[in-house]
Image (cartoon, rainbow, N blue to C red):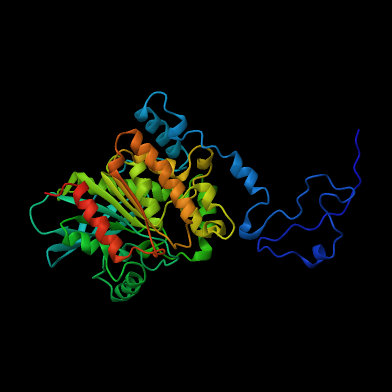
Amino acid sequence: MKRRAFVTLPTLALASGAVPAAAEAAPPTGPGVPGVAPGFEGPSVVDGMMPVFADRLKAELDFPLAWSGNRDGGFRAWKRRARAKVEELLWQPEDRSAFDVEIVDEQPRDGYRQRQVLFNVTGHSRVRATMLVPDGPGPFPAALLLHDHGAKFDIGKEKLIEPWYDETRRASARAWSERYFAGRFIGNRLAARGYAVLAVDALGWGDRGGLTYEGQQALAGNFFNLGSSLSGLMAREDVRAAAMLATLPEVDERRIAAVGFSLGGFRAWQVAALSNTIAATVSVCWMTGLREMMVPGNNTLRGQSAYYMLHPGLYRYLDIPDVASIAAPRPMMLLNGETDPLFTVAGVEAAYAKMRAVWAAQRAGDRLSTRIWPGLGHVFAGEMQDEAFTWLDRRLHRR
């Protein structure tokens, strides 16, 4: 039997990345030090809380369920398999409870009506949503608006539809709009173009608030302890909101779009992948390849907000753009900023290339629009909005 000399190993790095003083004084260890096994890596974490063997783990991710390796049986069969795998890993059961929609406030505005509605987003949660409905008989094309994260929890739906019912939220929402949306409320802009729009708070924001940035990880952990998932809940609720929108008499169920920025952009392509209700998608500032995202310094590596997008085990099967591609060949527009600090250009381009290959394989390349905007960062700027809404008008064949 081979015997190894025993040595005192240093205390592992703390979660903060700091090394205890005792470890600083410890004798050297590592490859080439007598008594230490070859390949010993020392402290278990590096900058960004990535394990030191992260590159080896990333190399093992070959995304075996991606369309590129699963063409046997045809595209529809692949979509069924891929969607089934995503749904399995949501850790959140489907919900078929009645929506029980109730209009609790309606007021006229120039060219449209603004509403507050209550509905059962799940069997456990009845929520207040905001809607704008164009004047006229309808039915109208519609947009499910999906709000961002931004570590700003006092407003959710109000980031997208200007609130008329709370002056404190209105002031907060206007400041947010100036920062990220060129001073515009995209829901109001779409309503003025003839769309019925709906915005709902995700768990943690607005009417469903009370969350802090530091509390997100505990909330997600407690969902896991309950046999469920925070990210899975958000995905299921977005699918439910789209389905509810399709039941309204003012809405043309064949012409419903998903529109979102930042986390809302993630939610937009995700709901398109999981729901046949979505006819077209506009996703702004959330697309990348997984490997290109998992690099030291990326915001996702800090945890917290990442838990709203983390489906355990998913990336053993599908890359991020593979999931979005489940929505093919339906129309989708993806816009990213060249200087966005959250997503490298290389990561965005890698994801776009994967998605273009999928739409092209379905002879639907003209239905996928991708663009990296020069000089723009993590924003949904006015010129981006103008291009996106004109594209959406064409794709939903407004009457």
Q: Pick whichever, 62 or 303, lies toward us.
A: 62
**Numbered circles on residues, count:** 0
Residue 378, image x, y percentages: 41, 63
- In this view, the residue farthest toward the left is 137
Quadrant in the picture for residue 275: top left
User: Can residue 122 be seen at all in this image of the molecule?
Assistant: no
**Residue at image point 81% right, 52% down:** 30
Residue 346, image x, y percentages: 48, 52
Residue 168, image x, y percentages: 32, 76
**Residue at image point 15% right, 62% down:** 113
Quadrant in the picture for residue 254: top left
Q: Pick whichever, 25 or 86, lies toward us.
A: 25
User: Can residue 103 be seen at all in this image of the molecule?
Assistant: yes
**Residue at image point 54% right, 59% down:** 298
Task: Please tell me whether residue 297 is drawn above or below residue 248 in the rendered image.
Answer: below
**Residue at image point 60% right, 41% down:** 59
- In this view, the residue farthest toward the top is 73
